[in-house]
Amino acid sequence: MKIGILGTGMVGNAIGTKLVQMGHQVTMGSRTAGSDAGKEWQKSTGGKGQIGTFADAAGFGEIIFDCTNGANSITALRQAGAANLRGRILIQVSNPLDFSKGMPPSLTVCNTDSLGEQIQREFPDTRVVKALNTMNCRVMVEPSLVPGDHQVIMCGNDAAAKAEVTKHLGAWFGWKPGNVIDLGDITGCRGMEMLLPLWMRLYGMYGDPTFNFQVVRGG
Amino acid sequence: MKIGILGTGMVGNAIGTKLVQMGHQVTMGSRTAGSDAGKEWQKSTGGKGQIGTFADAAGFGEIIFDCTNGANSITALRQAGAANLRGRILIQVSNPLDFSKGMPPSLTVCNTDSLGEQIQREFPDTRVVKALNTMNCRVMVEPSLVPGDHQVIMCGNDAAAKAEVTKHLGAWFGWKPGNVIDLGDITGCRGMEMLLPLWMRLYGMYGDPTFNFQVVRGG
């Protein structure tokens, strides 16, 4: 499958590397073509991964991952281009973390809106599915790093898109369908993104990002 | 033990009833003495529970639970009185939920501040411990309603107060010490309170509040 990845940071690297290892064709995009981070990733894949601009990656992918810096995601997606994103599934992974005032980061948007909603409003013809944002990138692509059952949360307005993402999360990364929580429409992004302050705090305490949340039900 | 409970809603009822059943002396406080909700609770305890104003309950308790409506918690605590709260442990359960604009509620404060922090600033001589706010009140007082391991999160500036609350959570409600997560100082309230939008969304989906979160660690 042809997959576009926007962003050359840790998250884009982890997802891109995993997908290349599985034999998919991956183009990783950044603000400028031929960025150092992009070249380094390409080298790490033995030249199998392709690199380019945000627009190159978006135009290439049958499905697109948004792994950009959350504070700049909308700018990056505009550079990717509404035409390239039209009708495509965008797996929106990034969080609106604001590190400009030091640690811990706050959110650039929350409570009555969210980054996922902003993106869906800005690109109404894109099938935005927020997913994977509530965990470290190593856990995203290898959930067995955390023992037992724990969950990946998703939301979005397009039920068919969410069903397809659920299938891919299983096939690509090993997420069991029973461990995928569908929160409903895109406004679910508020709760998903507002989990980040607790996540950051736990990470600071444990000194290790290899953990995840499980919702345990009674009754 | 003498315990004061501020608030006659579902949360105050659940905690007060459990503590009376365990043989503790409980005074439940509300805005006015002899409120209908207070009288009803007192009757439900066979007359063992006592009722009064916020100030009565705070003055009575060796330890005090804040189970007020979060949007009005600071007003209620002012009525309880700084002198009554001085030096005491305040288990701060309420969440700053704003239902004024309909469902789902938003938070009256979040991101760079929190209700728990506002209360600690307003009452600097009170030993504020935020706890139990991330679950339904039935689960608070009977964690075995949800199977297996799941956790109660707490934070606060006073380590001795948190140790005492941990002991009480075990003795009163059955929370194992290994299932108590101490997030550190009072700024941990941000993450704890910002979990509520996700909690509300899951509650809406499941139609049943009998669930809780577990942090699962790998590595």
Image: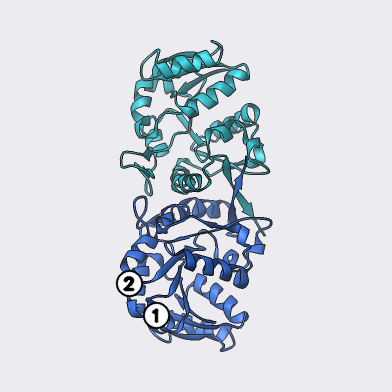
Chain colours: A cyan, B blue
Residue nearest the viewer, comparing A55 with A8: A8
Can you tell which mark lies on residue B75?
Answer: 2
Dot 2 alpha-carbon crowd within 10 angstroms: few under 14, some 14 to 19, many 20 or more: some
Using the image as rendered, state which of residue B62 and residue B200 is in the foreground. B62
Residue B191 location, x and y as percent?
A: 44, 52
- Which of the 4 image quarters holds residue A166? top right
Quadrant containing the N terminus of chain A is: top right
Q: Above or below — where is A176 with respect to B140?
A: above
With A81 as the anchor, is B1 left or right in this view? Answer: right
Q: Compare marks 1 and 2 and give the one earlier in the sequence.
A: 1
Residue A49 appears in the figure? yes
Report, in whole angstroms, how far the alpha carbon at label 1 lies from the one at label 2. 10 Å
Q: Residue B54 — which label?
A: 1
Q: Residue at x 33, y 68 (%)?
A: B124
Give SS at disc 2.
Answer: helix
Measured along the vertical axis of the image, is residue B85 above or below residue B174? below
Q: Are the two marked residues, 1 and 2, in contact with CB atoms closer than 8 angstroms?
A: no
Q: Residue at x 36, y 73 (%)?
A: B77
